[in-house]
Image: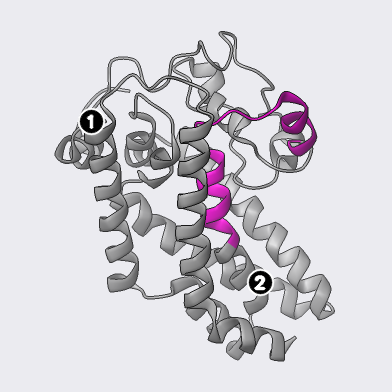
Amino acid sequence: MPAFEAALSARFADLHAIVFWGTIMAIALWEHAAPLRALAHPLRRRWAANVGVLAINAGLSWLVFPGAALVVAATGAAWNVGLLRWVQAPDWVAVTVGFLLLDLARYTAHLVLHRAPLLWRLHRMHHTDGDFDITTGFRFHPLETLVGIGYNSAVILITGAPVAAVLLYELAFPLTSFWAHANARLAPWIDRYLRRVLVTPDMHRIHHSVRPAEQDSNFGGMFTAWDWLFGTYVSAPVDGQAGMRIGLDGNENGQHLGRMLADPFRSGR
């Protein structure tokens, strides 16, 4: 495993760039070829604002704590801290369980972002987008990004997730996040088959409904098991995929970058 970790670490930046930009290009082409919903807002303005947030977050991630997850995982390994190290699990078990725990932590964080009023103020900018496409997966408030870096670092240290598990999850994260926000048509039988294990665009789109009961569901980032286990799974929107309204009623600050960044400091839902 150390040899695998070393090889993956050495090429991580290149692999991450390939996954990141390759996923964006592939999904953008898919959305263009087979869009599921007609967009309600001007594409150019929305994309400019959402890409602007992506650029700010990328800059923050590298300026504040470059490669935070990998640095923390390596530090935990050097200090020999974390549950998985204390139980001395075999490498393959530690990597598998560590990967699953990272995704469970992602689910838990998402749930808390919706339930805790202060954290909801940080997260709701993501939901003020009145449309749903790959760029919705870009729009997380910079303050939420900073909180997420700290939370993720704590999870890695506490669980003792191996460097290999963190490397693999960091590579999978952009792929699953952008995929889940695709405004693209997926054959129903493929969706039914995939969502037995993985979050699909049709499943996650329900989470962006204006209906509170639907918005308060489907928190999973990669695996659907957590929504099934904790009772937050909703299979279909009341108004259908093409008919449901996206966003937040009465609080759409989603078309202008300045208003988006100011959203946590505004009153309202």
Q: Amino acid at mark 1?
A: Gln
Does 15 sit above or below residue 79?
A: above
The answer to if 22 sits in the magenta stretch is no
Give the residues drawn in magenta, as a range: 172-195
- Which residue occupies the foreground of this view, 159 or 249? 249
Instruction: Give the secondary structure at mark 1.
Output: loop
* Real-space Cα separation, disc 2 to disc 1, in angstroms: 39 Å
Q: Which residue occupies 28% across, 15% down?
A: 250
Q: Residues within 10 Å of mark 1 (few under 14, many from 20)?
A: many
Q: Nearer the viewer, mark 2 or mark 1?
A: 1
Q: Is residue 96 placed above or below 100 in the rendered structure?
A: below
**Magenta stretch holds residue 185:** yes
Type of amino acid at the residue the image marks with label 2: Ala
**Image quarter hosting the N terminus:** bottom right
Along the line of sight, which residue is nearer the eye, 76 or 162? 162
Give the residue number, with chain letter if any, for mark 1.
255
Name the residue at the front extreme: 33
In the image, is 237 to the left or to the right of 53? right
Q: Main secondary structure of the magenta part?
A: helix
Callout 2 crowding tier (Cα within 10 Å): few <14, some 14–19, many ≥20: many
Pinpoint residue 67: horizontal percent, then vertical percent. Answer: 43, 75
Location of residue 112 in the rendering, given as x and y in whole percent from the top left corner:
51, 41
According to the picture, the residue beneath numbered tag 2 turns out to be: 161
Relative horizontal placement of residue 2, taking residue 258 as reference (left or right): right
Asked whether residue 123 is in view, the answer is yes
Q: Nearer the viewer, residue 157 or 200?
A: 200
Comparing 167 with 119, the one in front is 167
Q: Is residue 162 visible?
A: no
Is disc 2 placed on a helix, strand or loop?
A: loop
The residue at the far left in this view is: 258
